[in-house]
Structures are given as C-alpha cells and as structure tokens.
Amino acid sequence: VTDPVLRRVIEIVKQVAGPQRTPAEVGPSTLLAGGGFWLDSMELFEVILACEAAFGSVFRGLDEDAARVFHTAGSLATAIRARTQA
Amino acid sequence: VQVAALPPLLGVLRRMPGGPAKGTLILVGIVQAFLDGACWRRARAWAAVHASGPGDRRRLLARLLANRGRFLATALGVGTPDPESFRRQLVFEGRDRLDALVRTGGIMLLGFHLGPGGTAAKLGLAGYVVTTAGAGLRFRVPAPSYAWVGGARSPSIVWADAPSRAAGLHRLSELLQHGGIVSLTADSREDGRPAFEVPLPGRTLRVRAGWFVLRRLTGAPTLPVLTSEIGRRSVVTIHPPLPDPDPDLERDRAACRETLAPILREYVRRFPEQCLSLALWPDEGARP
C-alpha cells in the first residue's frame, strides 16, 4: 500500500480490530465489518474518532453516506481524501 | 404480525373518537400478549414476582398488559387531541436539575424503556430542544394519527446498522460538544455492546454501551430520566446527574451502576405495571 491516507487508515483499523481480527492480507478492498475486520458500531465509532485525530474534522454530515464510507478500508480512505480536499 | 398489522389499524383508529380508539389499542395489546405464549408466560412470571397475593397478581397482570396499548396510544397521540391538552397532563420532577445545566454545555438524558416514554417530545412541549437517537419505531405510522406528537418532537437521528449507528454516535458527540441536549435509551433491544448489568427484582436490566462511551468521550453531564403515568398525569422525573467520568474504566462502570441501581429498583417497586421492557421483552442476554 503506497497511498499515505490508505496506509494510515489501515493502521488505525488494525489497531482498533486487534491482531486476532486482522485478516492475513489487508488492502483497499478489505471489508471493515462482516467478512473483513468484523468491526461493530462501537469500533467503527472508535475508527471515526481516531481518523479525526489523524486527519482533522472530516466526518461532518456523514449520516447519509455512512454505509458507503464504512464499507471497506479503501472507501474510507477515499472519503477522507475527498473531504480533506474539499 | 404486530409490525404488519399496526399501520392499517392505526389508520382506522385515527378516524375514531379518542376514547374508543385508545380502548381498542389497549384491547389489541392484551389479546396479542395472550396469543403470544412466551410473552404471556413472561408477563405472568413478572406479576408473580411483584404482586402481594393472587388477587393482586391478576390486577397487576391486567394493568401491565393494558399499559402496552395505553403507552402506544400516548406515544402516537391517539386519544390526545392536541399538544395543549397533553401539556396540561405533564408534570416535570427535578426540572431544576436540567435548567441548572442547560447553560453550561452539552447534556445527555439517559432514558430506559420503562413507563410511557416520549421524553424528548414531552420536554419539547416544555420548550427544550432534545435530539433523540435510536433505531426508531419498527412500524410505519400513518402521519395524521401522529401529527401533533411529530410536531412536538425534537430532531432525531435514526440508525439501522453498524455504520449508521457509528455515524449517529459521532453526530451526537458533536451535538454534545456544541452544547446540545441529547436523549438516548440505555436498554435498547438493538445488538449493542453491553456496558454493565443491573440486577432488579424479577429481571436483570442489561445496560448498553453507546451512551456510556459518549459520556466518557465528551464528559457531558448525564441525567437519568424516567417517565411514569400516575392517574391522569404523565410524569417525567429528571434524576441527579451520574458521577463525572472516572479515568479508570472499571471504576467508572461501577460508579454508574451503583448510581443507577437504586433509581431503577425504586421505579420497579413503585410501577411494576409500567415496566413493559422488563416484564414482556425476551431476555436476549440470558440465552445460552
């Protein structure tokens, strides 16, 4: 993974999920919830807070987009990139 | 059946006078509980724990089951023609506790599925803007039967899955940090992570983690709020705030549990017929 935003997002998600739930191979298409890192709502909330600490307030008005943004590590990184550039 | 049948039933009820409409909802609630064997057994077990004798047990069972329809009617505005007539029935206990904190920053109101509910709408009628959050109603409500309650209702965040719940918690944290009042239930039936348990006579109440995490994150004063019906009065009781968050997670959990336990025990003792969630809902946490 060369993209710095995606690399940081993966670091954060790995930290929240812990080693036992981190898949052997992690990339942009790794699912954040079922079938990937298996994060629950509280852990996704932790990811939001950690991402805000790393990238600033990038999750304002997230309500409508939540399912799309939190689908995979790549979709989360894309959303953060779009919101930091906006 | 309940979820599918309620919208058409409410559509019919909204064309009826308030009293008979409310009576119909009460009757439907009793019959539905009777037909649902597991619900009926739970209700009888609850009544056996909280009644002082056989006659009292039957009375308690009848009042408990009648309250299903009564509380639903109240929540939907059935039998209550307008906000003003409902406002006249409202009594707030401990309102000074809320008023003392309103100007200091964000406040979290911690509710339970005990009593008639509708805390945010009731506080809305008293002039407070309270944002609610949760999974919302499981059935679609015909708008006209709901109109005045909807009008009195404050903003709400509805979540349906883990991502929307996480986004909702984030929105709530922003509201709290900007001085808003938010209302969350601590004992929802959603697949939430448990924070701790409060053993009560007849049932253990499983307290979810969402509000607890928000409280620790934002440091917002958290006021337990319980609602009850006493005669024709609809009472909203605002209790003193929980202790400030303790940096030690386990000590904090214990402090919240110790503060909430006597409040909940007293409510169950006074109003066993209004504890619908404890008496009638399946105890999912007790499954093997």
Image (tube, rainbow, N blue to C red):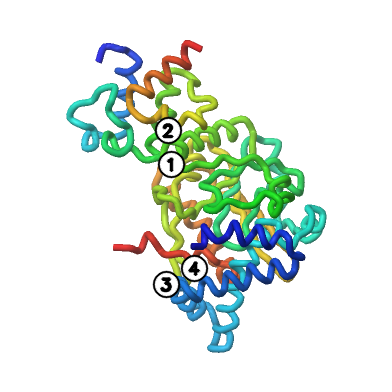
Residue B280 disc label: 4
The answer for how far apart the CA atoms under marks 4 and 2 are is: 33 Å
Residue ID for mark 2: A67
Q: Is residue B203 above or below residue B136?
A: below
Q: What amino acid type should be assigned to the residue bearing mark 1?
A: Asp
Q: What amino acid type should be assigned to the residue bearing mark 2?
A: Ala
Q: Name the residue rendered at 75%, 69% in the picture.
A: B19
Counting from the top left corner in percent of width and height, residue A12 is at 33, 26
Looking at the rendered structure, the secondary structure element under dot 2 is helix
Residue ID for mark 1: B161
Residue B194 disc label: none
Counting from the top left corner in percent of width and height, residue A42 is at 40, 39
Q: Give the foreground label among 1 and 4.
A: 1
Q: Name the residue rendered at 55%, 67% in the picture.
A: B275
Q: Are marks 2 and 1 in contact (CB under 8 Å)?
A: yes
Q: Is residue B192 left or right of residue B89?
A: left
The answer for how far apart the CA atoms under marks 1 and 3 are is: 27 Å
Q: Give the foreground label among 3 and 4.
A: 3
